[in-house]
Image (cartoon, grey):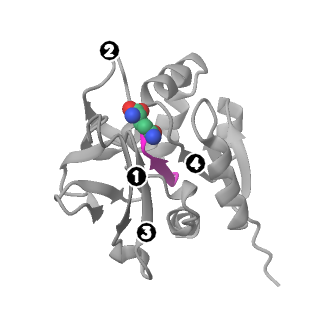
Amino acid sequence: MVIVAAPRAGVLALQGDVREHLGVLARLGADAVPVRTPADLVSVDVLVIPGGESSVIDKLSRAFGLQGPVRQRIAAGMPVYGTCAGLILLADRITDAAPGQQTFGGIDVTVQRNAFGAQVDSFETELEVPDLGGPPVRAAFIRAPRVVEAGPDVQALASLDDGSIVAVRQGRLVGTAFHPEVTGELRFHALLLDLVRA
Ligand code: GLN
């Protein structure tokens, strides 16, 4: 008999909606743990970067000595899923950044922060995501970014009616401008866990 251990899934726990992601990962059977230190990062098979405020997560990641280790794990092929601020942190380039703001990078995209303007700061919509199969995703956008330019190795997983790309994948890195973890959507996290075994 082969016993396959549950993947150990970390959530970068510096700021943002950490608890919601831990909940989704645990529901999917992962050993879900917060990641606050380089030692925590070493122990995980996959990482979620939550929504929150990307400039704050960036600053704290540098203060906690995590920027270099996260970049190294990304370069070494660790599966990572970023939602909203997490997508911004996975982007190689950003526009409308806070002064001095940096990213981990890894996905060859330019992401525009706070792309949907003040009146429609937050909205929910149904999104077709053909790669996930099944019904549309109920997607919550909260001061969300959008992808304004994508390199040739980037796959657009979902777009809004106006053509804005709001979900992308490059290899083992997945990013969404919206928050599936607040609408009971499990399929993006399931995809992340599948990537460990891939
Ligand atoms: N606007 C935020 C930022 O720039 C992202 C918002 C979110 O994660 N819900 O980081």
Q: Mark 4 vs mark 2: which is more N-terminal?
A: 4
Residue type at mark 1?
Answer: Gly
Secondary element at tag 1:
strand
- Observer-side mark, 3 or 4, equals 3
| Structural distance between the alpha carbons of marks 1 and 3 | 14 Å
**Does 114 sit left or right of 173 as displayed?**
left
Residue 184 coordinates in the image, percent (x, y): 58, 64
Mark 1 nearby-residue class (10 Å; few <14, some 14–19, many ≥20): many
- Observer-side mark, 3 or 2, equals 3
Q: Which residue is mark 2?
A: 99
Q: Is residue 68 visible?
A: yes
Furthest-front residue in this view: 119
Residue 85 image-quadrant placement = top left
Q: Could you tell me which residue is drawn at 68 percent across and 67 percent down?
A: 28
Whether tag 1 and tag 2 are in contact, CB under 8 A, the answer is no
Whether tag 1 and tag 4 are in contact, CB under 8 A, the answer is no
Residue 40 coordinates in the image, percent (x, y): 70, 37
